[in-house]
Image (spheres, helix red, strand yellow):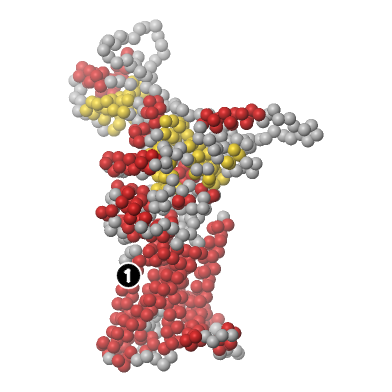
Amino acid sequence: MIQAIGLTSNSRQELPPAVDDVSFEARTGRVTALLGAPDAGKTTVLRLMLELQQGRGITYFRGRPLHRIAHPSREVGVLLGEVPGHPARTVRGHLRMLCAAVGVPVLRADDVLEAVGLVSLREQRLGTLSRGMDRRLGLACALLTNPHTLVLDGPADGLAARENGWLHGFLRAHAAQGGTVLYSTQDPKEAARTADRVVTLDAGRLVADQDAAEFARTRLRPRVAVRTPHATRLAALLAKEARSRRWTVEVVKEGGNRLSVYGSTCADVGETAFRHGILVHQLADETGDAGPPTTAHRQSLPAPEASPAPAEPRAPDAPPRKPAPECAPGGATERLPYEEGTSADGHTSLPNGALQPSTSDDPATTAQATKAQTASRPSEPQPQSHPQPPPQPSPLPPPITVRTNRNPLRPLRYELRRATGIGTGYFTVAAVLAVSAVLGVFLARTGHTPQPRLLVAWPTELPLPPAALGAGLLGAFAFGEEFRHPALAADRGPVPRRLGLLAAKLAVAAATALFLAVLTVGCDAALLHLVYGSELTEVPADWLSLSASWLTLMTGCAWAGVLAAGVFRSTTAGLAAVVAVPIVVVPLVQKALEGPSVRSAAGLPGRLRDLALVQWPFGAERYLAGGVRMVAQPVGSALTLSVTALLCAYVLTAVRGRAR
């Protein structure tokens, strides 16, 4: 079950808080509706419950706060808004990526697709789904871990009647299997029809907490729906007759030519229209809402004071008139202030201010225990030598701290599915290969470019070759797409800045950069051999060190893109950081290294080999010499410096966010 206690949002400058001291329960095996107008605070309540927004209060999910649960996604399935996935990703690809994030087998994606009826649309792109299909996909994402509790914000908003019926039938089946369902809605008739219990909010405060049957009896008023081209005239006539007969009738002009008449019948309204020759297009009895909106134009006609004059008698077969029930909160209970020992909802309060959930599901038992504990406290004798002041009530519940999302349980598998699930990476690789090949042929025609630069299509006029820019762009996509389409933050929380996720992204970016480096050299060499013959494709004498330098450059550009996009939360910023290395950082490094050098690092690979005390296999010192030579160059030094600075900035932001 869900126990929400004292949920209060932070004040907004001079405005009152959007949610003020809301407490309620959603029991196991039942569907609970959170009802309220569009600005009543429903979404704020759900975000406070899920610890996505700062405020005060505490929410227990089966006796534990959310931050005390090791894997919250396995306890609570959340659907807030639309599915935050990449529009080019397929339905099954999106679910399989989330399976790696939450640590469930990949076959679970097919199971939930069958459960929500999306098997035939498994290859559909997310950007082409309709509103109803998007709701089904969001429900499938919430059900991946088979959670006990479902928390949904407006799941039926904008759905057709058929999709609405299917959704609420599915939620009812989940509750019948022993789960807990809490959803928000602004339609009182929907809440009364589909929920077992209705919690009503108004202006951020709890006004009623009732069973659905009691809610329908006390807060839904019958009305007569009228549609006529003379709505204003008919409303005035109905008001005049009700005033003369001293009946309580309320006429609300819904807009255009529609009227809603509360406290009357179709027969009375039809007779009034007939007597005055008013054309009526529609006249029907309907189940109204919890009351007409306050912003609508209305004519409220309360009955006057009682007078000795008798009212006009009614026909014997006419149904008796009943006054429209007031919108007083039905079933709402008076809440006590928070005290040390017992909270307002029967939860034990620890001395340090933490709240302990009640173990009883019976509200009567909880209330009796609370009264007994409160009544027994004053009778306890206090020692005369050490008088103690009486306990002061604590009016404020504990604060809510927003915590970052947890690291994906299988970050490497998640990153692989994220990178390969859309065509952006493939298009980038194809564009890089095409530009590099054309540029290489053009450079070979002029004959002013050395062979090593010719094989990678790196003219002396450009700061970086196209392949290095492509590697940096692919690395920037790793974090840039996370912030643009936060699949890990389906509940709209912050994208996690965890070192495990960073390590997975760096590993995948490095592998992609190495693959792109080898593919670029191979394609350029093949095209040069085809166009100009074998003269330009001979293997250089120092190919090993050149290969190490080339692979190091590509990996460094990819890592710079990943780190910059993670720090600045933008793909553009990641690519800009890669371009800024040769344009901004390289001149600074060259200026710092100007002047004669007294000492050099010649022979460093040999000394490192002696330091290792073992023989390096396969001539690894040659690779190390190539890497050192790359770092010793201005571009390599600038790239190393940039990657180190970005890594420190990323770690600093991650530690800073965790400390907060």
Residue nearest the observer in this picture, 175 or 382:
175
Q: Image point 29% across, 11% down: which residue? A: 314
Q: Is residue 438 above or below residue 352?
A: below
Amino acid at the residue labelled 1: Tyr
Q: Is residue 295 above or below residue 491?
A: above
Q: Position of residue 498 (x, y in %)?
A: 50, 62
Q: Position of residue 366 (x, y in %)?
A: 55, 32
Residue topped by disc 1? 426
Q: Is residue 128 visible?
A: no
Residue nearest the observer in this picture, 410 or 556:
410
Residue lying farthest to the right in this orientation: 385
- Give the side of residue 67 with respect to residue 419, left or right: right
Q: Position of residue 249 (x, y in %)?
A: 33, 20
Q: Is residue 464 above or below residue 83?
A: below
Q: Is residue 295 above or below residue 132?
A: above
| SS for dot 1 | helix
